[in-house]
Image (cartoon, helix red, strand yellow):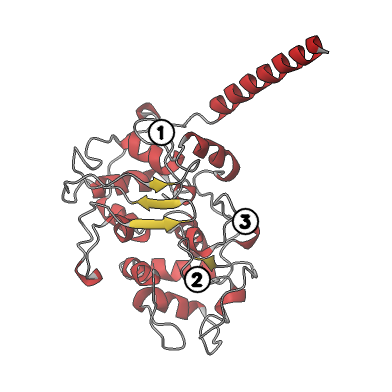
Amino acid sequence: MRKWLGRLAVIAAGAAIVGLAGFWFVTLPAVVTSSALPPHTPNLANGQTMFNIGGCASCHAAPNSDPDKVDRTRLGGGLALRSPFGIFYVPNISPDPKDGIGKWSEANFVTALWKGTSPRGNHLFPAFPYGSYQHMELDDLRDLFAYIKTLPPVEGRVRRHDLSFPFNLRRLVGGWKLLFLHGGPFAENPSKSPQWNRGAYLVNGPGHCAECHSPRNVLGGIIESERFAGGPTPDGEGWVPNITPAGLQHWSKEDIAWSEKEIASFLEDGINPAGDFAGGAMVEVIRNTSSLSAADRAAIAAYIVTLPPRQGPKPPPKK
């Protein structure tokens, strides 16, 4: 019996070692090398468009007690993002060489947005929405990087995240990626119009709309069957609405349905069909989308109205 138990223990230990080694191997952070990047001439105007639709300033601009006085070009970070896993502090992504990303290479930047890997080779926490940014086109990423480099450097390193165990272990993020990080650069649907494809790209890629407008499971992954169907905010103190047709027809208190034209208008001025102004985090989103071209806002609207109707989590009663 003792020999049998001893052999069983050895087998179990060996299996555990093999399992850990396998996990370590499959969760190695992925990188994009400089040699994989073809020659490219940056388009700063396009980089600014990606900056706006990507909401970079909304999270990375240094916070101010008066939101209307925030300098959207000073990307010193510091915003606290509360979640069920702890508090994430948005980093400094200004061109500062010491505290920001001034020493990052173009490949470092592409790797961060496509693969969720830092220049040091560590997994980035998915509070940074690379689950959506992975769908961005390479030239758009490179233009965005070039644009950010034209902004003023901001000194000051942001404090470390305040996360509970085991969510503070970056290696476990590799397992999260295996479960939820799938896909690659956006592929156009040839059966759809150029406008629809542009809207689909902006919404699912740089705009990362699903990151807020979708419910998540206990591991923080988007519930795909309810994508865009709304849900509680990460801090649990608010509610993000359903933006599929099933939700848009009941968004306002008067249950006024949204037309494609009204969605595009809302993205410009923040006024919904009932005459109410956008509130909460959507205020910052409108700051971003109002800077887009009318054609891009129309493209987003053209895509949104074609989303499959989905019933997400039940929101709290209207007040």
Residue 42: image location, x then y, percent: 27, 45
- Residue that mark 1 sits on: 122
Amino acid type, label 3 = Glu
Q: Quadrant of residue 41?
A: top left
- Pick the front one: 6 or 302: 6
Residue sitting farthest toward the top = 3
Q: Amino acid at mark 1?
A: Asn
Q: Compare residues 211 and 134 and report the one nearer the observer.
A: 211
Instruction: Provide residue 2's location: percent of width, then percent of height.
Output: 79, 12
Q: Position of residue 90 (x, y in %)?
A: 33, 51
Where is mark 2, residue-wise?
A: 239
- In the rendered view, tell whether residue 135 sits above or below residue 253: above
Question: What is the x, y in percent for residue 57?
Answer: 29, 58
Q: Nearer the viewer, mark 1 or mark 3?
A: 1
Element type where label 3 sits in the image: helix
Q: In terms of secondary structure, where does tag 2 sit?
A: strand
Furthest residue toward right: 1
Residue at (19%, 51%) from the top-left corner?
Answer: 151
Residue located at (55% from left, 44% from top)? 183
Disc 1 residue crowd, few under 14, some 14–19, many 20+, Cα 10 Å: some
Task: Say which label, 3 or 2, has the lower sequence index.
Answer: 3
For mark 3, what is the residue?
224
> Count of labels shown?
3
- Give the number of the mark in front: 3 or 2: 2
Give the crowd class for mark 3: few <14, some 14-19, many >=20 residues within 10 Å.
some
Distance, label 1 to label 2, CA atoms, is 32 Å
